[in-house]
Amino acid sequence: MNKAYAEQLSIDLEQQGYSTAGAIEEADLIVINTCVVRQSAENRVLHKLESLVSLKRSRPDMILALSGCIVDTDVTDLKRRFPHVDLFLKPGESAELLKLAGSRISVEGYRVVCRRYSPTAFITIIEGCDNFCSYCIVPYRRGREKSRSLQEIEAQIETLTEKGVKEITLLGQNVDSYGHDLPGSPDLADLLQELNTVEGLMRIRFLTSHPKDMTLKLLRSVASLDKVCESISLPVQAGDDRILQLMGRGYTVRSYYELIGIIRDSIPDVAISTDVIVGFPGESEQQFKGTLNLLADIRFDTVHVAAYSPRPGTQAATVFEDKLPLHEKRRRLQEVEELQKDIATEINARLVGSSVEVLVDGRKGERWYGRTRTGKLVFFDDNIDRTGQLVVVDVRKTSAWSLQGELKPERI
């Protein structure tokens, strides 16, 4: 969602005459867009802010703005700690920044920036979250759920496809909750049905889903709509019922297993990713082993793992005592990573000798790269610009993280 915000802000600034600076020291405007879902992310933000003190002092006319989840309703403390910051923008806000930025553009220096759009784009369809998981800061910083209208979303996507965007990812802290607060209560399945008709759009993805809110109607839509990719993000967070209860997740290990079975029965060749938190307050070694066993049984295509980090103001940080040493959290995190590396290596190895459809995102070094419908990263060689094209690649080699192959002569 931060990527979606940053991309839209870049578009808005470019329409005012700004362009990307070659280096941060040359910038007339710097926006630090923040995430504080973990302490490590917040630490990077604070370090960056401190590193910009001397630059702001030497160039006082430069605009320095801070946005995202680090900006709470009360910014008194932030203003005290970082007086060199000009603007503090709550998540999703940009009007004040655009007004100030526009006032700094001289008529003589004004120019229209012609942007080349990426083949892929992120589209926020619902902001905020009503779940209040005990470890999560999001509802306190982004507020309760608020959906955008179907018409507004569709109009934005139609504009993007006219500019060359071929794939969109629909975003929400809990994307499955989309529409419940809108007139008529349309849901995510309804939105997918509508967007599947947009001319020029080739692929549709969505994330992140909550296990307690995924419906059979949504799964049927994924299975039947040709533009919706066979890829599901379904965070499990832990493999123990007591830990899930303390997290406030609203489901059990058994119900999660049952949902995975329904998904795989409904969507052939689906790729499923998940999120895991290790070292939650009170998590015993046996409970952690429950998470490892779940990962080994289900065999996800991708696992995003993080060590528990207390977030001030959340229930987990206020009520539960975080006794587990950092080195133990890191050990558990490493065990998950090593297990998943083996699983992903085996899953991807099955694709050797097969042909996969790839939407080309761009170039890294000397190789073109893109993703399959199931989200697999693919690299291949070619001397023609393939950006934005759908191509077929014969897979010759795989690893846990990507596929490598040769381009077939014919294109889809």
Image: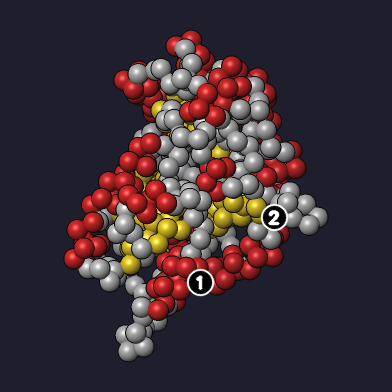
Residue on which the image places disc 2: 191
Among the two numbered marks 1 and 2 on one chain, the one whose residue lies closer to the N terminus:
1
**In the image as oriented, which residue stretches furthest toward the right?**
184
Specify whether 206 is left or right of 116. right
Residue at the (45%, 71%) spot, across then down = 98
Residue placed at 66% from the left, 54% from the top? 147
Q: How is the image coloured?
A: secondary structure
Residue 27, image x, y percentages: 27, 68
Q: Is residue 24 above or below residue 238?
A: below
Q: Which mark is residue 63?
A: none
Q: At which x and y percent is residue 43? A: 32, 41
Q: Amino acid at mark 2?
A: Leu
In the figure, 251 relative to 374: above or below?
above
Q: Quadrant of residue 88?
A: bottom left
Q: Secondary structure at mark 1?
A: loop
137 relative position to 67: left or right: right
Task: Tell me how many marks there are.
Answer: 2
What residue did someone put label 1 on?
163
- Secondary-structure class at tag 2: helix
Q: Nearer the viewer, residue 201 or 347?
A: 201
Residue drawn at point x = 54 percent, y = 68 percent = 160
